Image (tube, grey):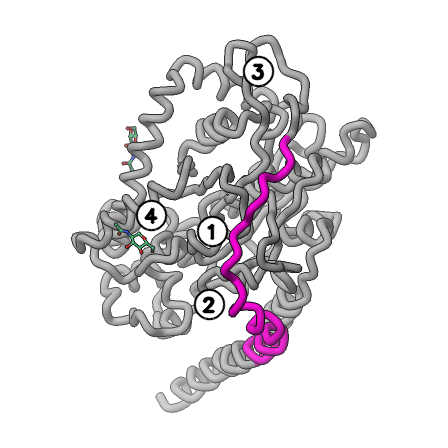
């Protein structure tokens, strides 16, 4: 008995030590890098005064089919705030934005030293690399804890605010899978199916104050800078949702990803070439837990605020599709699928995503969760027509690598990645 206990205890300690050390190391590094930024906070009154450069006409060739759209009359929008939510297919949108921004030499507001704006701390302009009060940017798109007032200081008045949501049941499952090893609250879960064990009695494991607890409850609400511990029937939930709807011009829905991109293209006056994509940061399907209806109901109830958020914006999303025209949407989605399939045939070896171990080129290996290797990536064909090589490479480049290519220093992220992979 005591032998088993002892062994369990030792295993627990082994698990604990890095987790006690790591946050401290990270905190120290964070403080070292953050001192210069603290000084700037006092002088952040200035708002962004300029209207940034516009693109004069449509940049890519238009196909005759799209002539019916109003796109000839508009010029492509270049000032964009993409609120990147967690576990919502947002990495794929990020890749689209990176490519567009790079192609048109737009100015990104990037974080410094890492790939997010000091998440989960609330967003501050001073977290932006090379920020000076009054400085304007075209695109803000890295993970942050949203604060509209603060973000708005970086962008011209005509900036378009976009975000993406996903069904909170799947989002919860995904977040639990991806982050549970980084949330100490879950370490007491001992069973085979930790997710079910948690959902059967969340109150027993959850505490709002605990380290990283927001990954376990209403993560969308948290990302938007709201209180993720509100109960669904709290009047503040609907108030916050209506408040958000005033700040975002378009809310995409991950379950309807292609329709989402078409609405985005329409809103931004972009061309179909601008929204071609390969799904990035997707998980091996065998690592996805299928929740039974009872567990789904529990997950919904537990994430009730996110559920209300999702339902609200799912409804506004479909009203947008209706206004856009169902038939027109169908045609555009088909065109997007066809074009994506063509790109896949040109670029991707074997035609599909593969596990990280099978990705030959290190540049295309995606970031993995702690203690796992479940996120897929791509191998490029070796005999790709040279005129497609660059675009193929960009389309399969994971977020961290792409940021690095765009000149962002990622030493904190890389250090954390190294520690993560060394310990597990
Ligand atoms: C909307 O959000 C702002 C900023 O968080 C807050 O000050 C304001 O009270 C909110 N408005 C409503 C109607 O909730
Ligand atoms: C989202 O809206 C669509 C269209 O109205 C509907 O079919 C679907 O069930 C909704 N999804 C959720 C989760 O409410």
The span from disc 4 to disc 3 (Cα, nearest Å) is 38 Å
Disc nearest the viewer among 1 and 3: 3
The span from disc 1 to disc 4 (Cα, nearest Å) is 18 Å
The residue identified by callout 4 is 168
Most foreground residue, 397 or 369:
397
User: Which corner quadrant holds the N terminus?
Assistant: bottom left
Q: Residues within 10 Å of mark 1 (few under 14, many from 20)?
A: few
Q: Are marks 2 and 1 in contact (CB under 8 Å)?
A: no
The mark that comes first in sequence, 4 or 3, is 3
Residue 237: horizontal and vertical position, in percent?
A: 24, 52
Residue 18: horizontal and vertical position, in percent?
A: 54, 79
The residue identified by callout 3 is 72
Most foreground residue, 39 or 417:
39
The span from disc 1 to disc 3 (Cα, nearest Å) is 45 Å
**Vertical side of 330 occupied by 365: above or below:** below
Q: Residue at x 27, y 60 (%)?
A: 199
The residue identified by callout 2 is 181
Residue 354 among those drawn in magenta: no
The mark that comes first in sequence, 2 or 1, is 2
The span from disc 2 to disc 3 (Cα, nearest Å) is 50 Å
Q: Residue at x 41, y 36 (%)?
A: 249
The numbered disc on residue 287 is: 1
Most foreground residue, 250 or 311:
250
**Vertical side of 282 occupied by 30: above or below:** below
Disc nearest the viewer among 4 and 3: 3
Most foreground residue, 232 or 141:
141
Residue 295 shows up from this direction: no
């Amino acid at each position: 008995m005591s032998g088993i206990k002892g062994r369990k205890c030792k295993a627990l300690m082994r698990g604990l030590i890095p987790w006690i050390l790591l946050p401290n190391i990270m905190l120290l590094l964070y403080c070292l890098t953050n001192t210069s930024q603290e000084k700037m906070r006092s002088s952040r009154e200035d708002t962004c005064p300029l209207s940034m450069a516009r693109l004069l006409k449509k940049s890519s060739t238009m196909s005759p089919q799209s002539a019916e759209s109003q796109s000839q009359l508009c010029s492509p929008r270049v000032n964009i705030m993409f609120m990147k939510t967690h576990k919502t297919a947002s990495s794929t949108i990020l890749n689209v934005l990176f490519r567009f921004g790079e192609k048109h030499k737009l100015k990104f507001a990037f974080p410094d030293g890492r790939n997010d704006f000091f998440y989960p701390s609330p967003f501050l302009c001073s977290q932006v690399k090379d920020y000076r009060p009054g400085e304007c940017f075209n695109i803000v798109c890295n993970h942050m804890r949203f604060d509209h007032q603060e973000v708005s200081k970086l962008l011209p008045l005509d900036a378009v605010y976009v975000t993406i949501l996903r069904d909170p049941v799947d989002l919860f499952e995904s977040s639990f899978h991806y982050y549970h090893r980084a949330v100490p609250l879950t370490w007491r879960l001992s069973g085979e199916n930790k997710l079910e064990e948690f959902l059967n009695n969340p109150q027993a494991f959850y505490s709002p104050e605990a380290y990283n607890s927001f990954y376990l409850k209403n993560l969308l609400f948290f990302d938007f800078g709201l209180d993720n511990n509100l109960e669904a029937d709290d009047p503040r939930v609907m108030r916050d949702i209506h408040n958000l709807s005033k700040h975002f011009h378009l809310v995409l829905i991950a379950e309807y990803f292609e329709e989402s991109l078409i609405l985005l293209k329409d809103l931004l006056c972009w061309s179909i070439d601008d929204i071609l994509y390969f799904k990035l940061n997707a998980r091996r399907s065998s690592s996805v837990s299928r929740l039974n209806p009872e567990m789904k109901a529990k997950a919904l109830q537990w994430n009730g605020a996110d559920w209300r958020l999702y339902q609200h914006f799912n409804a506004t999303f479909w009203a947008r599709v209706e206004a856009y025209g169902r038939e027109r949407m169908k045609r555009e989605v088909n065109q997007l699928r066809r074009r994506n399939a063509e790109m896949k045939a040109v670029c991707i070896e074997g035609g599909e995503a593969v596990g990280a171990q099978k990705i030959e080129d290190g540049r295309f290996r995606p970031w993995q969760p702690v203690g796992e290797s479940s996120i897929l990536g791509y191998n490029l064909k070796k005999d790709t027509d040279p005129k497609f090589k660059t675009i193929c490479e960009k389309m399969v480049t994971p977020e961290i690598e792409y940021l690095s290519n765009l000149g962002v220093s990622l030493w904190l992220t890389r250090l954390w990645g190294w520690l993560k992979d060394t310990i597990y």
